[in-house]
Image: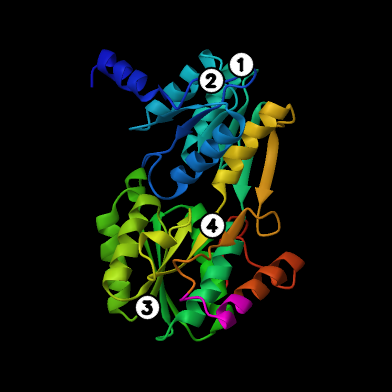
Amino acid sequence: MKPVLAGLAVAVGFMAAGDLAQAEVKPAIVYDLGGKFDKSFNEGVYQGAEKFKIETGIAYRDFEIQNDAQREQGFRRFARDGFSPIVAVGFSQASAVEKVAAEFPNTQFTIIDMVVDKPNVQSIVFREHEGSFVVGLMAAKASKTGKVGFVGGMDIPLIRKFACGYVQGVKYANKSADVFQNMTGTTGAAWADPVKGGELARSQIERGADVVYHAAGGTGLGVLRAAADAGKLGIGVDSNQNALFPGKVLTSMLKRVDVAAYKSFAEAKAGTWKPGLQVLGLKEEGVAYALDDNNKSLVTADLKAAADQAVADIIAGKIQVHDYMSDSKCPM
């Protein structure tokens, strides 16, 4: 694409989510690859922003990048136009945030899923391994074959963190269970390949897995569909995906990125926004398992009791869930 056309593409992406209702706070979002309606990570951030807009009357602007080169463009454009705070969705935004935050020291940036050490950057990360442990326990208890699966998106330590927690939960409930694991790829394209996700899930199902958990963004939609089509159970991630295939999604491991986005905007409005690191786990209700009308027939009273007990024990420190990010030797 020629420079002029590239500039036009970026400009078109900056469509307002609504007119700004107040001048004192001008929130904005730069989504990661996959788009804001990915039914997963990006969409969770969108939902948090929408909640803020509905409650306060303050609208926001957002930008859906189409390639890696647009990351810096997005942040710089918003910062120049006086938007603050600017929420960066995903670890892949880290280098762009670090660079642009240095150029605009008076602009507030919030990055989700990565730590950027700048005086005007708020970093929000999650204890995904805790939530993954709980749904792993549920998968093992719901399985009739003693075999379950995991499909990750991009093969990075963060997704290995999901997988490690899941395996621990499975093994906690059933020491002899088998856990099949596959990663979709090594580039950003791994988040948006539902066809490949479906293929990997079907391969695990053919080996006997009857519950498959995904941490793969848009790719995971293929995982859930493959499980449903095969008469097996899927487990969603990030957003509540139970409704995508009612009665075929055992639960979803909620990663409350909606809370992260909402908090950033609300704190800026209240004048309490602070830079630095925030870590959200089960105790902080930053992760959880989803229970609603779409999966209530699957989650028996005994299964719910076991899941709730695991949550309580993790919060109390009775169960220690290994964090792959601090030590890549995942206990099996």
Quadrant, the N terminus: top left
Which residue position holds label 1?
23
Verify whether residue 247 appears in magenta.
Answer: no
Q: Are marks 2 and 3 in contact (CB under 8 Å)?
A: no
> What label sits on residue 329 in the rendered view?
none
Which callout, 2 or 3, points to the residue nearer the camera?
2
**Can you say which quadrant of the picture contains the C terminus?**
bottom right
Q: Which mark is residue 20?
A: 2
Task: Determine the image quadrant of residue 326.
Answer: bottom right
Cα–Cα gap, marks 1 and 3: 53 Å
Residue 32 in the figure: left or right of residue 50: left
Q: What crowding class fits label 1: few (fewer than 14 Cα within 10 Å), some (14-19), or many (20 or more)?
A: few
**Marks 4 and 2, the one that precedes in the sequence:** 2
Mark positioned earlier in the residue sequence (4 or 3): 3
Which amino acid type is marked by label 4? Leu
What amino acid does circle 2 point to?
Leu
